[in-house]
Amino acid sequence: METPIFYQDVYDFLESKYEFYNQLSFIETDPIFVPHLYTKKEDIEIAAFLTATIAWGSRPTIINNAKKLLNLMGDSPHEYIMQFREKDLVVFSDFVHRTFNGEDCIYFMQGLKNIYRKHGGLEYLFTENMKGSAASPMNAISYIRKTFFKLPHLPRTEKHFSNPEIGSAAKRINMFLRWMVRDDGRGVDFGLWKNISPSKLMCPLDVHSGRVARKLDLLSRKQDDRKSVEELTANLRIYDPKDPVKYDFALFGLGVFENF
């Protein structure tokens, strides 16, 4: 990977689009709208994790299905996770979002319960595994994924929690981390997790942001994989070393709303 170079015109363009798209007015059309329906910290992070898990395909469908899923939890996700009995999980049997089906959904309830009851919760797990200057979010995701799948489960369910160890871009988990960690006072991202620096985050990468990043010469690799995430984030750190993933607003907005 070549040494990143600062270009003033690219910086100005990214900053202007970040300012434009990082607005509450865009929330209702974005999956982040769903966790914004909650106020309790644990409700927000569980709603965010589940919404991010199914965040592929049509955005209105993502939002509708995430709300449906949380409604099955009595719209009190943390209380539900902590208190459900195995027989209660039958209500998820018919849940479907694309390839994420009822069996996957039931395991995700079990996996979350195990994390909150025996491993300190999502924030604790991510924070503990991203300590130190050399700690990598991608390595943290891989470790937490292993923890998440410690209970008996169907092999097919594993595809719904990205694995950076095999080169995945882990777009949805990196998006979830952006939601939980960033706090720029704009009210879009939550900034609930105070002990992880935004400087450590990796930019969510999908077909839209990847296309825009390549047009702006922020990304040279053709694949949307882990190495591309690392290259893109390294380039974005040239423009804001303290908060590189703020430019996800610019890249995604340009790709989705402007077909840049």
Image (spheres, rainbow, N blue to C red):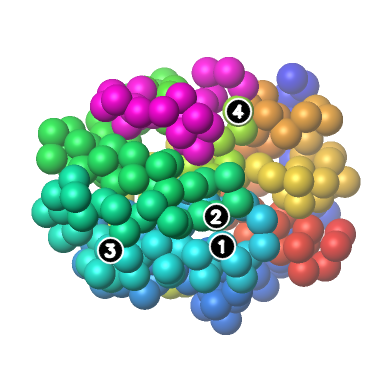
Residue segment shown in magenta: 144-167
In-front residue for pair 200/212: 212
The residue where tag 1 is placed is 62
Q: How far is the residue under mark 1 from the one under mark 2?
A: 8 Å
- Foreground pick, 235 / 21: 21
- Report the mark closest to the observer, 4 or 3: 3
Q: Is residue 88 left or right of residue 159?
A: left
Upstream in the sequence, badge 1 or badge 4? 1
Residue 182 shown left or right of residue 59 in the figure: left
Which residue is at a point 46% across and 25% down the rendered structure image? 155
Q: Which residue lies under the disc numbered 2? A: 97
Picture quarter containing residue 205?
top right
| Local SS, label 1 | helix
Q: Is residue 243 visible?
A: no
Q: Residue at x 34, y 70 (%)?
A: 71
Mark before the other along the chain sequence, 4 or 2: 2
Of labels 3 and 1, earlier in sequence is 1
Residue beneath disc 4: 168
Q: Earlier in the sequence, mark 1 or mark 2?
A: 1
**Type of the residue with mark 2:** His
Q: Residue at x 29, y 46 (%)?
A: 109
Where residue 115 appears, x then y in whole percent? 22, 37
Pointer 3 residue? 73
Q: Is residue 88 above or below residue 120?
A: below
